[in-house]
Amino acid sequence: MNDQLKELLYQMLETELGGVQVYTTALECVVNDELEEEWTKYLEQTERHVDVVRQLLQTLRLDPDAQTPGRQVVKHIGESLVQAMRMALASGGEPEAAELVACECVVFAETKDHMNWELLSKFAQKVQGAETEALAAACEEVEDEEDEHIYHSKGWCRELWIQSLGMPAVLPPPEEERKVKTALGAAHAEKAREEML
């Protein structure tokens, strides 16, 4: 098996594990009830994604507990995002400020997560081999949820920032209302927000 594929898979598992911690902490920061509902759903999905990647590693006869330098970096980044949210909570500022920090941390985490699944999907489509079927099945199970996580999270972050700046915001964001799952859909939703005000 390709060494870089192994590295991607180990980083994927660590990203999902970190994602569970990011969402758990973000839920301590949330103020908006609809965002809390969204993040609760994403936490449950991310916990399932951990199981999907762990099972994929086992199917490919890889040790899910193996450590790589890249995996350690991903773990450090996830821990840093959790620490940033804890700092925001401990600052004694407005609860909405901690919620904004949490939104940004979710977007950071989901950017890496989305890229991981996109890369794995591209690999599964282009490469022939014994592992191709298992890779494709995992992508089929998770990729749509990851698309929703990134595009909806960016929308929430943008709209909550707009609201914090004293401008009219669209909440929940148009990405959520339109059930966006593509970059093009996100671009259309952001453009349409002006019409929604």
Image: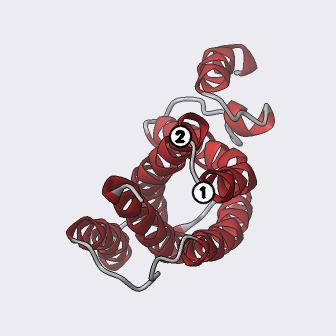
Which of the labelled discs sits on residue 130, or is there none? Answer: 1
Taking depth in this image into account, of 11 and 193 the one nearest to the observer is 11
Name the residue tied to disc 2.
127
Q: Amino acid at mark 1?
A: Ala
Q: Residues within 10 Å of mark 1 (few under 14, many from 20)?
A: few
- The image quadrant that residue 66 belongs to is bottom left
Q: Secondary structure at mark 1?
A: loop
Q: Secondary structure at mark 2?
A: loop
- The image quadrant that residue 58 belongs to is bottom right
Q: Is residue 38 above or below residue 164?
A: below
Q: Residue at x 72, y 55 (%)?
A: 137
What is the count of numbered marks? 2
In the image: residue 138, left or right of residue 92 = right
Residue 164: in sight, yes or no? yes
Which of the labelled discs sits on residue 175, or is there none? Answer: none
Q: Is residue 81 above or below residue 172?
A: below
Q: Residue furthest left?
A: 69
Q: Residue at x 20, y 70 (%)?
A: 69
Q: Amino acid at mark 2?
A: Val
